[in-house]
Amino acid sequence: MADELLEALGQRQRETDAAKPPIPLGDFEGEAGDALLDDMFGELDDKARQKPAPSESPPPTEASPDNVTALPKRSPAVWAGAGIVIAAAAALVLWLAMPSSIDPLPAYGPVSIAGGPAAVRGDHEGIPEVLKLEDPSDNIEWRFAPATSVEGDLEVVLSARRADGERVFATVPNATVTPTGSVQLRGPLNSFIELDEGHWTVQVIIARAGHAPGSAEDAMREDWPRFPIEVIIDAS
Amino acid sequence: MSDLDDVELVSRALAGDGAARRELGRRLMRAVAREASFAVARLAAAEGRDPRQEVKDLVHDVLLGLFDNDGQQLRRWDPTRGRSLESFVQLIARRRIPRMLSGGRGNPWADAPIDPADIDTADDADLAKRLEQRNQLDQVLAAMHAKMNDRDHDLFDLIFVQEISPDAVAEQMDMTRGAVNAWSYRMRKLARAAALGAAAGTGGASTQAAASGGARHG
């Protein structure tokens, strides 16, 4: 049966959920637990006190002419599956909105947005905004580069909305991240996000690890930097 | 305590009510400690560390993350999505603890490059049997939890833990049956990648494509 591995993992999860914790939890009860909370809340309050007052140059949270940076030109990328070659370029989109304690990412821009047998060129120079796929398993190659080199772990999520309002959200653990922080999604679209037929707007969101939106609702609510790609899946 | 009471408790705690904050901290501490206990038990023996101290450190760090940034993580809890407060926090801990145990590298079992072709051709039944024999299912589960988002967790819980039929889950989650199938396909590949790594003795959970990424640098 195709899902025997997942079924075995589900059974193991049931066993774990029903089991007693292997390491006793006595350290979290009574005075010991209170001491741990005192320590944690004390650290939290210290951190809050150390935050700069609102008048002291708060970090930018929205795109503005001052914090939008142009990407350097990059070499053309060849998309073997679809035969699409897209030269790099793109004005940068948004400053990354991050909590003030997080080192903000530089702006990201698209280098290559390709997929399926045909791509329709959009407004951006050399970057199609609309991809037409015949099947959710068609290959895509989406590449994004930061304006400056990025250190540290990254997380990529996709938040998609179909024309009829259906929403799908997916983290992308199989995105490739280069040592300089460029991000590439290459392979079947449905290995990254499950979309049915229809006209979708897929928002690509790149964030520091642990600080990406965790759901479609979060992705909508928060002022996350994003790059929208129109994806039409139509087998006819 | 009802979900409505818990909504009120979270709201008061994050609005600065000290008593509510402490009560909430006590509630969540136990849920987080339970997750940390299982995670540390898998690793501590091999690394020769004091497991009780390790659990305490993890609980401290996870709780700090929950309350930090004006409780941004806790504010995501929505009881109408079917999870209790404790269950919601357990899932956050389940995702975050593997990252912490690996020193922020993503998760402790994510380093082995696996050929994508092996993932496509792997025999699930054989993998499951090998993992059971080696007591490595926990290792694969931890690697997967670190990679799954909230929706993945919900679907995995409903379909494979609670064993609710995919048709009923599709209706409950307001998804098409095709979308549930596509999700299962993606999870199958994720599980196979983690299982192949574990079965090979490396515990890897990333594909070759993801070896330089998997949403982390490489």
Image (cartoon, coloured by chain):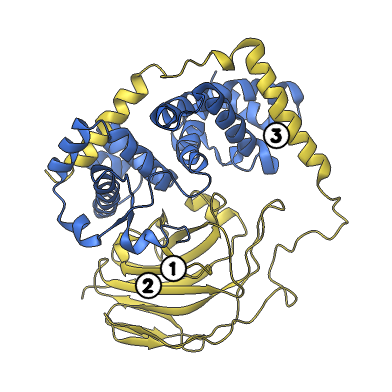
Instruction: Tell me whether the residue at label 2 lies in contact with that at label 3, contact meaning CB atoms closer than 8 angstroms.
Output: no
3 vs 1, front mark: 3
Q: Are marks 2 and 3 on the same chain?
A: no
Residue in the picture at 15% in, 56% down? B121
The residue tagged with tag 3: helix, strand or loop? helix
Q: Chain under label 2? A: A
Query: Which numbered circle lies on residue A201?
Result: 1
Crowding at dot 3, Cα within 10 Å, few <14 / some 14-19 / many 20+, comes out as many
Is B130 on the left or on the right of A124, as rendered?
A: left
Q: Tell me the element at label 1.
A: strand
The Cα–Cα distance between marks 2 and 3, rounded to whole angstroms, is 40 Å
Q: Which mark is residue A231?
A: 2
Q: Quadrant of the N terminus of chain B?
A: top right
Q: Residue at x 87, y 57 (%)?
A: A56
Identify which residue is drawn at 22% across, 73% down: A235
User: Which residue sits at x=54%, y=66%?
Assistant: A226
Asked if the residues shown at circle 2 and circle 1 are in contact, with their CB atoms under 8 angstroms apart, the answer is yes
Instruction: Inspect the image, locate mark 2, and give the three-letter code of the amino acid beneath it.
Output: Val
Q: Chain of mark 3?
A: B
* Horizontal side of residue B177 vs A232, given as left or right: left
Q: Residue furthest top?
A: A30
Q: Which residue is mark 3?
A: B14
Amino acid of disc 3: Leu
Letter of the chain shown yellow in the rendering: A
Name the image quarter holding residue A97. bottom right
Choose between B87 and B56: the one closer to the eye: B56
Q: Where is residue B72 shown, x and y percent of the image?
A: 63, 43
Q: Secondary structure at mark 2?
A: strand
Task: Specify the chain shown as blue.
Answer: B
Left or right? Give the position of A200 relative to B6. left
